[in-house]
Amino acid sequence: MPEVLKAPLVVEFPFTRSLGPVQSAFLTGLRERVVLGVRTSDGRTLVPPVEYDPVTAEELRDLVEVAPTGTVTTWAWNHAPRRGQPLDTPFAWALVRLDGADTALLHALDAPGPDTVRTGMRVRIRWAGERTGAITDIACFEPYNGAAPRLTGHDGHFDHAVTGIVAPARLDYTYSPGRAQSAYIDALSGHRTVGERCPACRKVYVPPRGACPTCGVATAEQVEVGPRGTVTTFCIVNIKAKNLDIEVPYVYAHIALDGADLALHGRIGGIPYNQVRMGLRVEPVWTAGGRYPDHYRPTGEPDADYETYKELL
């Protein structure tokens, strides 16, 4: 039995979104060191502003300026800041109700230690030195005992308003594939593809998950499949992926390996992208030192009959 594997894994992508008039005004205001909320029909002022009343679902557009000072309503101490958080030294996450607002804004509070933070303490915004129209234009909150500043009465109209943002999303975690997939990965290092057979329905699943997805029973019997297989479905990729040195267009396909009852996916090479088709017979191509097939290429065999793979689409 091979050692059960584990490895750090990062899922990361930029999330691009457009802004409606309320969020556009709010973020543009932060760029200009102005904090805007939105007023509801019953007179509440919501900060951060939303486009629809969370109580009545009424559309909201009445923007109103609030103060950059406020009161901590609740907080939690962060002993070990993580990558991408507002401060790189210990700080408090705090909900702050800004003066003039009826709801609280979540952000970092820079304080010497947890014994210096309390519910009800007065704070103010510390603005970032460079502001671009994002929530990070508020660098953090800091303790403040002075009076609230005089407001300008800004109506929320700005020149060169922010109309969209790019928010990076990232998830860091440790992934363990478990017993079944560890065995699968170990076999791949020897240029072999191994699945597991369900003791009830007798289907062979690749990659194995340790249990039959149909019957729900544990699987343990290993079955070597392939190496050849049949293209069941495919797509043509026309957008080049970051850090992937493959020229577009190229083809990714679901491939039913001989002896398997579940198709896995792989890149198709050795053939023009517009000649890839359902039923194409393919075989894996391994690179020196590779732990998995680099791509699959045509075998030169006649195409498989549709009836032989229709259940694997």
Image (cartoon, grey):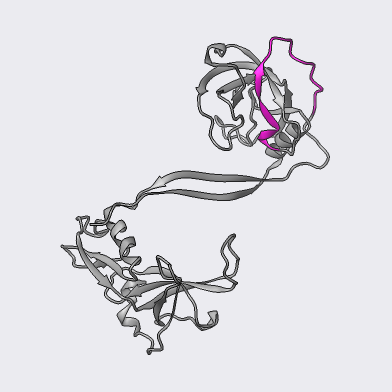
Side of 163 where 104 appears, left or right: left
Residue found at x 34% / y 73%: 256
Q: Nearer the viewer, residue 165 or 86?
A: 86
Residue found at x 57% / y 12%: 116
The stretch drawn in magenta includes residue 144: yes
Stretch in magenta: 134-154
Q: Position of residue 109 (x, y in %)?
A: 61, 22
**Residue 209 to residue 256: above or below:** above
Q: Position of residue 48 (x, y in %)?
A: 64, 30
Side of 1 where 190 appears, left or right: right
Most extreme residue toward the left is: 200
Residue found at x 58% / y 60%: 243
**Residue 253 to residue 73: above or below:** below
Q: Position of residue 210 (x, y in %)?
A: 25, 56
The stretch drawn in magenta includes residue 285: no
Q: Nearer the viewer, residue 173 or 311?
A: 173
**Quarter assignment of residue 248:** bottom right
Q: Position of residue 174 (x, y in %)?
A: 41, 45
Q: Nearer the viewer, residue 260 or 245?
A: 245
Residue found at x 50% / y 24%: 79
**Quarter assignment of residue 125:** top right
- Quadrant containing the N terminus is bottom left
Total numbered badges shown on the rendered structure: 0
Most extreme residue toward the front is: 289
- Quadrant containing the C terminus is bottom left
Q: Is residue 247 visible?
A: yes
**Residue 288 to residue 153: above or below:** below
Q: Is residue 43 visible?
A: no
Side of 274 where 147 appears, left or right: right
